Amino acid sequence: MINISKLYCDEVTPGDWLRYGRPGSGEKAHEVVPKSAAERRPIVVWNITRRCNLRCVHCYNDSGADKPCREVGGEHARTVLDDLSAFGVPSVLFSGGEPLMRPDLFELIEHAVGRGLRAVISTNGTLIDEDKARRIKDIGVSYVGISLDGIGPVNDTFRGVPGAFDRAVRGIRHCREAGVRVGLRLTLTKRNVQDIEALFDFFERENIERVCFYHLVPSGRGADIAAEDLTHAQSRRAVETILAKARLFKQQRRRTDILTVDNHVDGVYLYRRLLEEDPARAEDVWKLLTWNGGGLYSSGVGIGCIDFNGDVHPDQFWGHYTLGSIHEKSFSDIWTNDDEPLLAGLRNRPARIKGRCRLCRYFKACGGSLRVRADLHFNDPWAPDPACYLADDEIGLTQEKIEELTRCGELYDMPE
């Protein structure tokens, strides 16, 4: 995640203690601010069900109403949470499918909170009525992230169900009325990128302070709409709009927590902007970006995933690569297996990264971004991230370096 509010606008935002090693940003008494990003335990995305009441065109794990899965249930699910707590996991993100379709969701969350874990719900919001919102508040959920991908019909087309937008908005309002911290999640594509201004207007009307703009990862059904991913030029314009809106909200003294997700290049782009606008601030931001490390300490380090079959992955998009199963071993045992080749590689990227990422002057801040996107596009997890929208000259890739990559067989055909 690239926290625009923190980096560009110098806001103190929840999670800075974990994301940037900065205390005084919402950490609890028992939570230790990590000395380095490399030593963090992973935030665990747990897809506790594959069942879903919507049919989203970009669903990264191909969920649906009648999709088969091997859910971890009952006492075993509580044992998994006990292991995550003992392992020092800072947060469990209960996702799906649609997690509210799992009957024991609230019981599992109560157990997690009782073990000192932060519990987050990732939901489409359409099933949150007043009673559920109050229950979410009462059991101690830290945050509810609700997915919207446009205003009105644009969102409903994404979600595959008419009326999904209106029901999600009601869910948002129920959460706010119950005092639940709530934010929005949106995946940028060619279908909705032109609506960013309208979406910010919506955030303002609904008094929503937190929003995450995700870059598309072509996993699951997301592969079916890969052609709708933003061009590099569109990505740049989208980030420009997000930066401008974040700055405007800052000037209006509105508290915000605006982030972009799944493309660490955004942090470098932001840094380059600050070099022109505020060099002193840029220097501070460089320290934050390199402490975090971008992709260096994300997948396989600072984030992990348990899917609806109980399989463990380096993040929620690595469904095609399984590290192990919690039906057979504990998450902590799977996660600390030093002999697992992909985990070993993700935790020592500089020795494996190829192509323009290897020679990029900003590698310490970006870390090669999202390895799963490289794997899905080039069938090579160490290839360049195809979503990097910085030009060769911007990253310091001279003609001499291009010739070096050609000699090494590392000159990849990047999309535009």
Image (cartoon, rainbow, N blue to C red):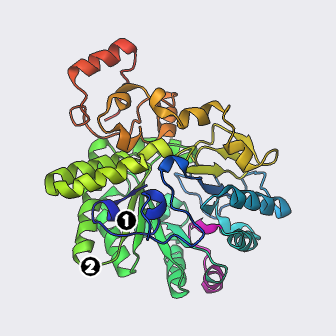
Q: Position of residue 44 (x, y in %)?
A: 62, 55
Residue 329 magenta-highlighted:
no
Classify mark 2: residues with Cα within 10 Å, few (<14), some (14-19) or many (20+): few
Q: Residue at x 35, y 54 (%)?
A: 288
Say which element carries label 2: loop
Q: Quadrant of the C terminus?
A: top left
Classify mark 1: residues with Cα within 10 Å, few (<14), some (14-19) or many (20+): many
Q: Amino acid at mark 1?
A: Ile
Q: Position of residue 286 (x, y in %)?
A: 30, 50
Say which element carries label 1: strand
Q: How many marks?
A: 2
Q: Which residue does the numbered mark 2 point to in the structure image? A: 253
Residue 212 tag number: none
Q: Earlier in the sequence, mark 1 or mark 2?
A: 2
Q: Position of residue 134 (x, y in %)?
A: 62, 85
How far separated are the C-alphas under marks 1 and 2?
A: 14 Å
Please say whether residue 310 is visible from this viewpoint: no
Q: Which residues are magenta?
A: 117-136
Q: Which residue does the numbered mark 1 point to in the structure image? A: 258
